[in-house]
């Protein structure tokens, strides 16, 4: 490693640490004020509350953002002090300056991939468990399929839940009296949360006759049923894609498809788990191209704001592309990789212009 590469790498790592710490603190403060009332009402102990907030830190978003900002600041400072102009005058091209950010981008991408595969499934599952069982006081068993929830004198079973379309499949709703006798059971092929209430379809309803204990069976095409849980509760109970490693997710997709369920949502997430970590590498290249254009005296704030704007656009494009994949308008592979490819060519164009 040359002196130049070592200097750039040290500066990027230093600013990465400072930026990451700052953004993390800002996020935790905002999350704290949003959730603190419910946590206090639940009587959750301080250690578990602290663990909950730590488990919710979105490192998968903070690492790429910190990577972008650190590279922008380092090259923006070099540009402001005319260091990049001096290097170009000495025959050092913008592509040569990419070596250190590129290497660190690869490292950050690998760290993000390892985090998504090893740490993220554990911490997200733990955060969801604390929220459901100790804050909302809902007893659950998880998870990817065969979801059980216990409500007030009721037990619900859901065979499969699609967290994007907010649909539950093969649902059984059991209602009991004070003596824990089954008074009503509803079996439905699917249920959808619409306009604040659950609507179930292809229903068989069994209602207990209080006189002789027999059950009256009725079949309905559609029926609205008031329940004491919402899709957000199911999202926390059902094991989401980010709570599964790639092998787990692949196995789940295969199993669910063999049982006849539509796994488009999970296929999109599977490809996205592979594509997304590369955002660190792509944003590093874009940051170098923006900050290293060689305009003397260019305002560092303008450089940073431009980079943040591009990063924001990336996450908007990422979310929009995944939504198209969830809706079946794009193949899962295309939906996951389209933002990366778009920004890869953007980085190439910016680098060519910077040179």
Image (tube, rainbow, N blue to C red):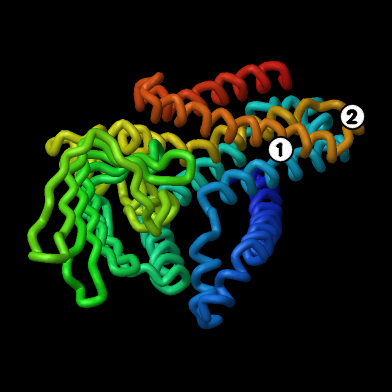
Dot 2 or dot 1: first in sequence order is 2
Residue at (56% x, 45% y) in the render:
104
Residue at (56% x, 32% y) in the render:
282
Q: Position of residue 340 (x, y in %)?
A: 50, 28
Q: Position of residue 236 (x, y in %)?
A: 40, 56
Q: Position of residue 341 (x, y in %)?
A: 50, 23
In the current view of this chain or complex, which residue is farthest to the right? 297
Looking at this view, is 233 or 212 the one in front? Answer: 212
Instruction: Kindly indicate whether the residue at mark 1 contacts the one at mark 2 (C-beta within 8 angstroms).
Output: no
Q: Is residue 196 above or below residue 21?
A: above
Q: Secondary structure at mark 1?
A: helix
Q: Is residue 122 above or below residue 260?
A: below
How many neighbours does mark 1 have within 10 angstroms: few (below 14), some (14-19), or many (20 or more)? some
> Separation of disc 2 and disc 1 at Cα?
21 Å
In the current view of this chain or complex, which residue is farthest to the front? 211
Q: Taking 313 as reference, is 121 left or right?
A: left
Q: Is residue 42 above or below residue 32?
A: below
Q: Is residue 116 above or below residue 177?
A: above
Residue at (56% x, 47% y) in the render:
61
Residue at (13% x, 38% y) in the render:
259
Q: Taking 223 as reference, is 24 left or right?
A: right
Residue 285 found in image quarter: top right
Residue 240 shows in this picture: yes
**Residue matched to label 2:** 296
How many neighbours does mark 2 have within 10 angstroms: few (below 14), some (14-19), or many (20 or more)? few
Residue 162 shows in this picture: no
**Residue matched to label 1:** 308
Q: Quadrant of the C terminus?
A: top right
Q: Taking 241 as reference, is 99 left or right?
A: right
């Amino acid at each position: 490693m040359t002196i130049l590469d070592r200097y750039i790498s040290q500066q990027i790592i230093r600013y990465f640490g400072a930026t990451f710490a700052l953004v993390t603190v800002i996020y935790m403060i905002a999350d704290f004020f949003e959730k603190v009332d419910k946590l206090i009402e639940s009587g959750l102990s301080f250690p578990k509350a602290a663990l909950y907030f730590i488990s919710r830190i979105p490192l998968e978003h903070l690492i790429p953002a910190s990577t972008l900002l650190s590279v922008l600041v380092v090259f923006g400072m070099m540009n402001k002090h005319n260091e990049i102009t001096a290097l170009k005058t000495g025959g050092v091209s913008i592509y040569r300056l990419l070596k250190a950010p590129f290497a660190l981008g690869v490292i950050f991408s690998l760290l993000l991939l390892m985090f998504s595969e090893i740490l993220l499934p554990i911490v997200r599952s733990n955060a969801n468990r604390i929220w459901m069982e100790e804050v909302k006081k809902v007893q659950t068993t998880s998870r990817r399929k065969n979801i059980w929830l216990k409500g007030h004198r009721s037990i619900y079973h859901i065979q499969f839940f699609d967290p994007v379309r907010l649909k539950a499949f093969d649902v059984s709703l059991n209602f009991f009296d004070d003596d824990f006798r089954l008074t009503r059971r509803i079996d439905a092929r699917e249920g959808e949360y619409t306009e604040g209430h659950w609507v179930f379809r292809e229903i068989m309803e069994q209602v207990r006759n209080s006189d002789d204990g027999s059950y009256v069976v009725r079949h309905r095409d559609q029926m609205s049923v008031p329940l004491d849980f919402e899709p957000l509760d199911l999202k926390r109970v059902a094991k989401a894609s980010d709570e599964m490693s790639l092998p787990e997710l692949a196995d789940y997709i295969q199993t669910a498809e063999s049982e006849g369920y539509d796994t488009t949502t999970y296929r999109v997430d599977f490809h996205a788990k592979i594509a997304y970590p590369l955002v660190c590498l792509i944003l590093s290249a874009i940051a170098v191209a923006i900050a290293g254009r060689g305009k003397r005296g260019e305002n560092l704030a303008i450089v940073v704001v431009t980079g943040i704007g591009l990063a924001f656009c990336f996450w908007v494009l990422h979310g929009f592309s995944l939504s198209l994949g969830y809706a079946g308008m794009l193949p899962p592979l295309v939906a996951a990789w389209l933002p990366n490819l778009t920004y890869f060519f953007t980085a190439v164009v910016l680098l060519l212009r910077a040179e």
